[in-house]
Image (cartoon, coloured by chain):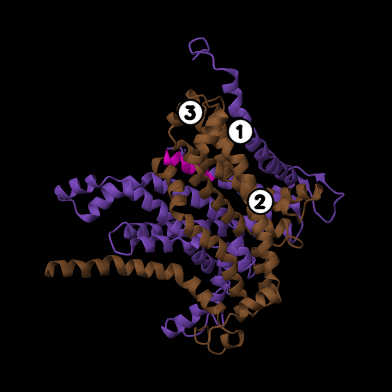
Amino acid sequence: MMVQNRSVVRRILTVDLPVALILLFTLAPYLWMALTSLTQENKLFTDGPSLVGATLENYTRLFRTVGFGSNLLDSFIVAGGTVVFGLALAVPAAYAFSRFRFRGRRLLMLQFLVINMFPLVLLILPLFILMRSFGLVDTYLALIIANSTVAIPFSVWMMTSYIDGIPRSLDEAAMTDGCSRFGALYRVVLPLCTPGIIATGVYIFITAWNEYLYALTLGGRNVKPITVAIQSLIGEYQVEWGLLTAGGIIGAMPATLLFLFVQKRLIAGMTQGAVKG
Amino acid sequence: MTATTIPPVPLSRRVLPLVMLSPAVLVTLAIVFLPMAQAVWMSLHDYVLFRPKSFDFVGLKNFATALKDPVFWISLRHTVLWIAITVPAQMLLGLATALLLNQEFPWRGLARALVIIPWALPSVVIALMWVWIYDANYGVLNEFLLRMDLISTSIPWLANPDTALYAIILTLTWQGFPFFAVMILAGLQAIPRSYYEAAAIDGASKWQQFRNITLPGLAGVLMTATLLRLIWVANSIDVIFVMTGGGPGYSTYTLPLYAFINARTGLDYGYGSALAVCFTLLLLGFVILYLRRAGRNIG
């Protein structure tokens, strides 16, 4: 009994306590922001943020006077559009990479890997000029296309690793049973990789939702995603931290909730390649 | 490997993968490779956006200007500093976190889920959050340090040229270490338990087990995760842009940020592109060196 107690105490000191400290470091800034957003603006500078007399005033003000609603809508359209566009192109490509061996396969796969390394800043300037010459600046389409520069290569890689995880014998069996290749893809492979498609889609959504530099450069007036809206608050309302932090909480909410929802599957997909490699 | 030794592949099997790939490939060519080529082309020209008529070929003049530009060298120095501190800090913190989360304790699942939250937050929100924490008058960091008697007067972390870059580095470390933690945790779980049992029987200490089993077992994951993070950290400009905009003075300029600011506020796309191309080449060179040293390919 004594020995067991001592090992529990030891575990608490060497594991639980350090983990708690790391979590404190991880979560404290976020919680501090949440607390600030619930504090009345004028109390912020006299008493500091506190839960006593918590109010949603900052949030209502955000939607009534600043018009955050339309920014949220813009973000949803852009992020949703990127998901649809990205997946529509990436799933067939991933299927081809996973199921066929053909000339140039390695080179094409490498191409999708290398794209991930290009600095955004190298693409922003020419994309702006391209969009301007097509009259697309400040449209949803411009932001969807720009976000796809990141979304497509990433989802091709994710989806290839998911489809690789589905045994070939399954779709081959379906084809010997009389399915065409597309029939096998549609009836066997797609249903089996639905979880992977969802995880990849969620990741694209989060990335596009969180994106800022493209949104700032290619949007900004008619199309103003939430990240740009939050940032422009900093300029306009220099000291209104209650309002600003409320904006931050709202802006972070959809991505954070989605992330917690699919994190297990997402992380499995992302780390698989690394661990095998 | 001649065609006669293997049965001929039916045409449909040869064409189908290309048909399925072509949309993704063509779109990436159009939205990534074409713009990239255009950036290189622009970098060889005098191209200022508010003088749309002038697009004069100037050869390598922009690059020569960069070499003589003191801000270029300041930005380069900051970029190196920024990567050299942030990536190892993220890696060590991530390693420690992963080792802890790999132990048995009752609330492990919850801790694993919560630790990755910074990863899901938008950079703008992260920047905003930390600007509020660093605030000179009302920021919680100053308040905390004052109460602990570690400092005697409030420090304007982001307004002080000596501390601004390090304040942002701390923010970025906070944002990125969960990625390492998650990757390393996956790597730890791939190391067979029997190795440790055998080592324990042979009388190896915990430290010896860590050095001879854990670290070699993690080598692949550490290489890959470090490479990915290095590229992301090097490229990330949104956090700095929102937190300080590069200031005060040039104290938080990095190379990609300098390129972006040059084009955005100066509208000097020729010089901005030249800076972006310089940065890309430097990064590419570094990545190739890294992969050579690592002696392995990913994928």
Counting other residues with Cα less than 10 Å from the Cα at mark 2, is it few (<14), some (14-19), or many (20 or more)? Answer: many
Report the amino acid beneath label 2: Gly
* Structural distance between the alpha carbons of marks 3 and 1: 23 Å
Residue placed furthest toward the right? B53
Q: Chain of mark 3?
A: A
Magenta residue check for A244: no
Mark 3 and mark 2 in contact? Answer it, CB < 8 Å: no
Using the rendered image, report if marks 1 and 2 lie on a common chain. Answer: no
| SS for callout 2 | helix
Quickly name the residue at label 3.
Answer: A174
State the extent of the magenta-drawn residues as a range: B286-295
Chief secondary structure of the magenta portion: helix
Q: Give x and y (percent) for residue B35.
A: 70, 44
Would you name the residue on which mark 1 appears? B21
Disc assigned to residue A192: none
How many other residues sit within 10 Å of disc 1, few (<14), some (14-19) or many (≥20)? many
Alpha carbons under labels 3 and 2: distance apart: 33 Å
The disc numbered 1 marks a residue on which chain? B
- Mark 3 vs mark 1: give the one in front: 3
Residue at numbered disc 2: A81
